[in-house]
Image: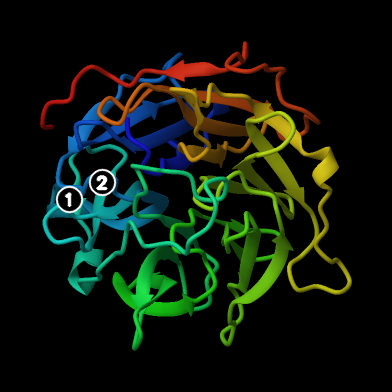
Amino acid sequence: MVASPLGLVSYSTNTTGGDDPGNEQSFRLYFQSAHGNIKEIAYNGVLSSWSNATPIFTDARNNTGLAVINYMNDTLHQVSAAADGLDVLELRQSQSSLFYVSAYDGLLQEKRNYATMPAWEPGSLGSMKVQAIGNISVPETNSVENPPNDWDSYRMAAVYSTEFYGGPGARLFYHSLAAPNGTSCVQELIWNQTADTWSLGATLADPYPNSHLAVTIDDSTRMLRLFYSVGNLTLQESFLNISDPNGVYDQGVNIPNLLAHNDADLAVVSVNGTALVYHYAHFGNQGIRELNITGTPGSSEDPEMYNLSSEATVSQPALYRNGQLSLYQPIGATLTTVGGLEPQIYVFWAEQNVDEASGYQALMTVSRSIHASSWPASSYGISTAAVELPLGDNDADP
């Protein structure tokens, strides 16, 4: 696999409730193989292990960004025979939208599928004809902040909620060039699920040109929280109250000298009002750290707080290749979503980078309960609790 961002969704396979929550928890993980196709790894609850990764489509640009959302859709209909004619039944189906950059024209594209149907069909995003920007020139800095990276890719992030003012929908963030002078920025796209339409949203000028993006929505505060690099190894948060009809993005925490590189990958999840940010560390135990940010963005009564000295070490992947330290490989994070199941956090990462042609040879995951105070013990290149996911041998066209 290459260093494109991972796409992750977690959802329930049973929308009406069931007797075995463990069998209802599903995950889907998406990545780009070194052959260029997009592959999917599935965990369906009833299985005892992750499925082999299989190709699902091939029209993504090399080093594409990836972002995915999952939501319920009422528009699938089933027609059945009845005594007085035909009955049309409206079914609530779990549906996913996967966003990427087209290999043909560099435009943002969307593919959708239902959990019960393997086929992927074009979504409505393509009609926007939005040009994504990748491999953006960065300011001259030292090699610690911006090491040589043959896999600088298109960065994007997406999040879905039923609680947006104006109705259920999503926000998609990607790197663009702002008019009129073509300066680097991050652009927001807004999806209205009911109308199935897209529109331009806010423009954020401060993200670093090749920064990764990580976004989450905190259900307890209804805050959208977007994290990214602003250079100088600094992590920045922008936030938005999704229930406010006049809401605009404001800046939250700013943490200097936190990131391993300006283009190092990021992931984030929200747990009961707390943002858990996963990042590579350039100090202490080199590996993936968990930054715990409590409080409510923009609140004077419940201000955001964090303690760098108490960051937990999630894992210490093998990060060296040919004597060089590589801290920009993909990471991702998600939560279990099924009621009645012990809530768990899952963190994913790539490692064992052989060369640019072969890519990463391993995709790993480790989990913990949200009630646990630490992650399973690990040392450099070794995590006894980590599970290796099967990348699959099949790289043929789907």
Residue 373, above or below 295: above
Q: Are marks 2 and 1 in contact (CB under 8 Å)?
A: yes
In the rendered image, which quarter contains the N terminus? Answer: top left
State the SS at label 1.
strand
Residue 334, above or below 230: above
Q: Residues within 10 Å of mark 2 (few under 14, many from 20)?
A: some
Query: Which residue is at a point 15% across and 41% down the rendered structure image?
Result: 58
Give percent across and percent down for residue 29: 39, 35
Q: Kindly identify which numbered label has been placed on residue 113.
A: 2
Query: Which residue is at a point 77% across and 28% down the rendered structure image?
Result: 374
- Along the horizontal axis of the image, is 91 left or right of 311? left
In the rendered image, which quarter contains the C terminus? Answer: top left
Q: Which residue is mark 1?
A: 121
- Along the horizontal axis of the image, is 229 left or right of 41? right
Badge 2 amino acid: Asn
**Residue 91 visible in rendering:** no
Give percent across and percent down for residue 147: 48, 44
Query: Which residue is at a point 61% across and 47% down the rendered structure image?
Result: 269
